[in-house]
Image: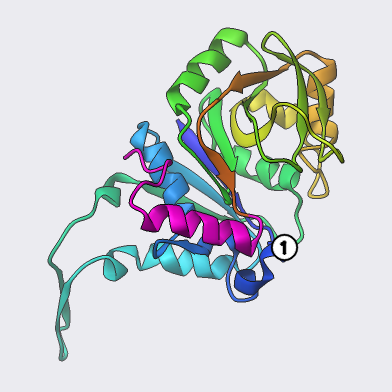
Amino acid sequence: MKVVILCGGMGTRLREETEFRPKPMVPIGGRPILWHIMKHYAHHGHKDFVLCLGYKGEIIKEYFRNYHWNTSDVTLKLGRAPKITYHNHHEEEDWTVTLLDTGAQTQTGGRLKRALKFVEDENFLFTYGDGLTNSDINASIKFHKKQGGVATITAIRPSGRFGELAIDGATITRFQEKPEKESGLINGGFYVMNRKIGQYLDNDECILERAPLEQLVRAGKLKAYQHDGFWQCMDTYREQQLLEGMWASGKAPWKIW
């Protein structure tokens, strides 16, 4: 199943790192957080990615263009007939990565709308380039298909400050983006979507988390797959250091591959 990942935001709350690179390229254990997210999807068998680029997108393009070069031992034959020999392989050789320039100022819904032309199947996976989890992606797909909604959000219990959800059974009855106080489940940012989501997206100024999701709520078409395990975003330097510490401990909860 195709995996669409938003990689175009400026990450202003992580300015210590994002002044020089896009937030998905901020490292955890020497690898971009984007790599960790993609490894999670690949572990569940989903290795066809569409990366929606924006701010400093050329850095992400360079990373994947030179991926084999940067992850391998190499021998160079110099001269008029140069030759490069790679001495090792990597687990990512069967990945397909589409690098899509979606504009520096485009909002989340606008980026998703631009990506839909690369989604051929009825359903696809969607997430942001700054969050990690150990959720069961395939279980969320199965749940999504059973519920028959347009979009399914992986709902988690956080420390606070994210879009809060009210749920009746599996159907979301209220979606409040970043309320002042949160007491229950929130949007964990890992979605399963039907291509019908495109009917709710209009232009580059469209913010997915506002009118589109609110319309789906009113129509009873936004579902919640509850995940009680690990989830952590990386919005601030403190959170980046928290994730670094988890990785360094050798017990990172999201490393299930």
Image position, residue 14 (x, y; %): 66, 65
The vertical placement of 245 against 232, above or below, is: below
Horizontal arrangement in the rendering, residue 42 relative to residue 206 (left or right): left
Q: Is residue 240 magenta?
A: yes
Asked whether 19 or 197 is in front, the reply is 19
Query: The N terminus lies in which quarter of the figure?
Result: top left
How packed mark 1 is, by other alpha carbons closer than 10 Å (few <14, some 14-19, many 20 or more), is: few
Horizontal arrangement in the rendering, residue 32 relative to residue 231 (left or right): left
Residue visible at 48% across and 30% down in the picture: 135
The vertical placement of 84 against 240, above or below, is: below
Horizontal arrangement in the rendering, residue 9 relative to residue 123 (left or right): right
Image position, residue 101 (x, y; %): 61, 58
Residue visible at 76% across and 60% down in the picture: 105
The vertical placement of 26 against 227, above or below, is: below
Q: Kindly identify which residue carries mark 1.
A: 13
Applied colour scheme:
rainbow
Asked whether 44 or 83 is in front, the reply is 44
**Displayed quadrant of residue 11:** bottom right
The part of the chain drawn in magenta is 235-257
Q: Secondary structure at mark 1?
A: helix
Image position, residue 36 (x, y; %): 43, 50
Q: What amino acid is found at the position of numbered circle 1 in the picture?
A: Arg
Whether residue 17 is visible:
yes
Residue visible at 31% across and 40% down in the picture: 257
**Displayed quadrant of residue 221:** top right
Residue visible at 81% across and 43% down in the picture: 206
The vertical placement of 62 against 191, above or below, is: below
Q: Is residue 182 magenta?
A: no
Asked whether 117 or 49 is in front, the reply is 49
Image position, residue 119 (x, y; %): 54, 35
Whether residue 200 is visible:
no
